[in-house]
Image: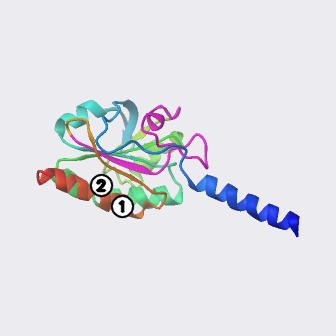
């Protein structure tokens, strides 16, 4: 009986540890770390530069664990469906991942997910994710599911971290719309 209770409590402790991201996300109001990364848009490689994108308007930087995983497919599809709304509000969307980076080109053009609507950046050494405190505890070497909205002044105006992909688009779009409205 004692062994069973010990085993169950060990399993519960492990589950709790795996459910929590490795680090707390950056705070709202903090300066967003600048980055340059290899990226893909519709399967075509290019270099994404946050500083250049911010000159055009706010940027949504969303970290996701890995290309072609279920939650990431859902999240990418939701961002693709709302890509025109983000553009209409003057915002750039960029997905960043450390997982399955060898498949990002393919994922960026897949018509079921990204559809070439926004770029995806590769972060194979987790340098960007670590700067943004968006690493995944349960899968070392992968990014967490954390979204940031960064204003033109390089300040973070929204941080949303949740492994469930369903609300990242609505939360980030609301923040972008608030910026557009002057708030």
Neighbor class of circle 2 (other Cα within 10 Å; few <14, some 14-19, many 20+) is many
Residue picked out by circle 2: 172
Q: Is residue 43 above or below residue 127?
A: below
Q: Residue at x 39, y 31 (%)?
A: 37
Residue 111 in view (yes/no) = no
- Whole-angstrom CA distance, mark 2 to mark 1, is 12 Å
| Residue 95 point in image, percent of width and height | 39, 46
Residue 43 among those drawn in magenta: no
Residue picked out by circle 1: 78
Which residues lie in the magenta part?
124-151
Residue closer to the observer: 30 or 97 = 30
Query: Which is more N-terminal, label 1 or label 2?
Result: 1
| Residue 44 point in image, percent of width and height | 37, 39
Residue 149 among those drawn in magenta: yes
Residue 107 in view (yes/no) = yes
Q: Is residue 11 left or right of residue 120?
A: right
Q: Is residue 49 above or below residue 180?
A: above
| Residue 58 point in image, percent of width and height | 22, 43
The residue positioned farthest toward the left in the image shown: 182
The reply to whether the C-beta atoms of the residues labelled 2 and 1 are less than 8 Å apart is no
Which label was assigned to residue 35? none
- Magenta stretch, main secondary structure class: loop
Q: Residue at x 31, y 45 (%)?
A: 28
Neighbor class of circle 1 (other Cα within 10 Å; few <14, some 14-19, many 20+) is some
Q: Is residue 21 left or right of residue 96?
A: right
Element type at mark 2: helix
Element type at mark 1: helix
Residue closer to the observer: 7 or 161 = 7
């Amino acid at each position: 009986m004692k062994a069973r209770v010990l085993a169950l409590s060990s399993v519960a402790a492990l589950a709790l540890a795996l459910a929590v991201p490795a680090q707390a996300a950056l705070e709202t109001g903090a300066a967003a770390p600048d980055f340059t990364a290899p990226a893909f848009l519709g399967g075509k490689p290019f270099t994404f530069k946050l500083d250049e994108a911010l000159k055009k308007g706010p940027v949504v930087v969303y970290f996701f664990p890995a290309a072609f995983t279920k939650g990431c497919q859902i999240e990418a599809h939701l961002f693709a469906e709302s890509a025109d709304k983000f553009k209409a509000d003057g915002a750039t969307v960029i997905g960043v991942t450390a997982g399955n980076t060898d498949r990002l080109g393919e994922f960026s053009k897949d018509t079921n997910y990204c559809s070439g609507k926004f770029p995806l950046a590769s972060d194979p050494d987790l340098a960007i994710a670590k700067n943004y405190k968006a690493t995944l505890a349960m899968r070392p070497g992968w990014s967490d599911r954390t979204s940031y909205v960064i204003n033109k002044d390089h300040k973070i105006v929204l941080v949303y971290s949740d492994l469930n992909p369903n609300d990242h688009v609505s939360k980030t779009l609301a923040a972008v719309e608030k910026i557009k409205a002057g708030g």
